[in-house]
Image (cartoon, grey):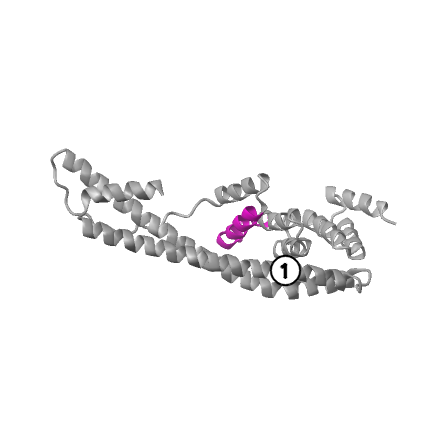
Amino acid sequence: MKRWKTVVLILGLALPGPALATRADEIEAELRSIRTQLELLEKREEGYRQQVEELGKTVDRVSQQAAQGQADQKAVLDQVRARIEGLEQKQQEISQQQVNIMNRLLSLQDTLDSELGGIKARLDRLDGGVEPKPQPLGPAGPAPAADFREAYNLAGAQYRQKNYAAAQAQFEAFLKAWPNTDLSDNAQFYIGECYFALAQYDKAVVEYDKVRRNYPAGNKVPNATWKMALAFEQLGQRNVAKGFLKELIERFPASPEANLAKKKLASWP
C-alpha cells in the first residue's frame, strides 16, 4: 500500500489530475477483479482437497480387500490413480488459472514500474532544466526464464523450512518448465515427500510412483520405492508395503534403501 501511495504521489507531480485519477481507478479495478478470482479459486481448491481426503478413506476400505504380492501393488495403485487423476486434472486447471492470474498481476506490476521509472526520469530531467522527449508507457518485456537450478534450489529452500505446501507447488512448477533435467526426478520425488510430510499418504504414493514410471533410470527410484512402502504402511496396507520392500531388495540389492527394507521386513511378523 505504501508503494502504491508513492506511485500516486509521483504521478500527481507529473500527470494532470483527471488523468491520474482515471489511471488509478483502472488499476484499482483490475486489482479488485484479480483478488476476487483468486478467492474463488481458493474455495474451489479447498473443495477438491476435501474430496481427496474422502478418497483417502476409500483407499483404506479398498486396502482391506487386497491380496498379497505384486498383484496387490498393481490393483491398489490402479485404484488410487484412477480416483486421484480426475481430481488432479481439476487441480491442474485451477493451478493454470492461478498462474494466469499471477501473470496478470506481474504484468500490472511491470506496468507500474515502467511508468514510475519514466516519471522519475522525467522529473530528474526537469530538475536539470531539460524537458525530456515523450516516452511511451506500457508493460515491460517478459522477464528471462530463471535458471532451472536456481528454481530447484528455491523450492528446496521452502521444503527445508517445512513450508511443504509452498514447496510442493514450486516443485510442480519446476517440472512444468523443466521436465527433463538432471534434477527433474529429484523434483518429482520431493513432491511425494511434501505430501508424505503433510500426512497425505495416498497422494504421496501416486507421486512416488511417478518417479518410478517417468524416471526409471534416475537415482531416486530406490528411495521412491522405499517411501512408497512406508506410505502404504501408513495407509494400513502392510501386505502391499511388503511387496514393495521385496521388490526393492530384488531390484536394488546394493542400495542403502535395500538394507532399510531388510530391517523393516525383519521387524514385521
Q: Residue 263, how many percent across, how many down?
A: 81, 43
> Is 127 rendered above or below residue 173?
above
Determine the image quadrant of residue 81: bottom right
Q: Residue at x 25, y 52 (%)?
A: 23
Residue furthest toward the right? Answer: 269
Q: Can residue 182 be seen in this view?
A: no
Q: In which quarter of the image is the N terminus?
A: top left
Residue topped by disc 1: 52
Q: Which residue is drawn at 42% across and 55% down?
A: 35
Tell which of 245 and 97 is nearer to you: 97
Q: What element does badge 1 sit on?
A: helix
Tell which of 230 and 119 is nearer to you: 119
Determine the image quadrant of residue 26: bottom left
Tell which of 12 and 269 is nearer to you: 12
Residue 64 shown left or right of residue 130 in the figure: right
Give the dominant element type of the magenta stretch: helix, strand or loop.
Answer: helix
Residue 234 shown left or right of residue 9 in the figure: right
**Amino acid on which disc 1 is placed:** Val
Q: Residue 41, how many percent across, how many down?
A: 49, 59
Bounds of the magenta span? 165-185
User: Does the segment drawn in magenta span residue 22?
Assistant: no
Q: Residue 61, how many percent across, how many down?
A: 76, 63
| Mark count | 1
User: Does the segment drawn in magenta span residue 172?
Assistant: yes
Estimate how packed mark 1 is, as few (under 14), some (14 to 19) or many (20 or more) residues with alpha carbons within 10 Å.
some
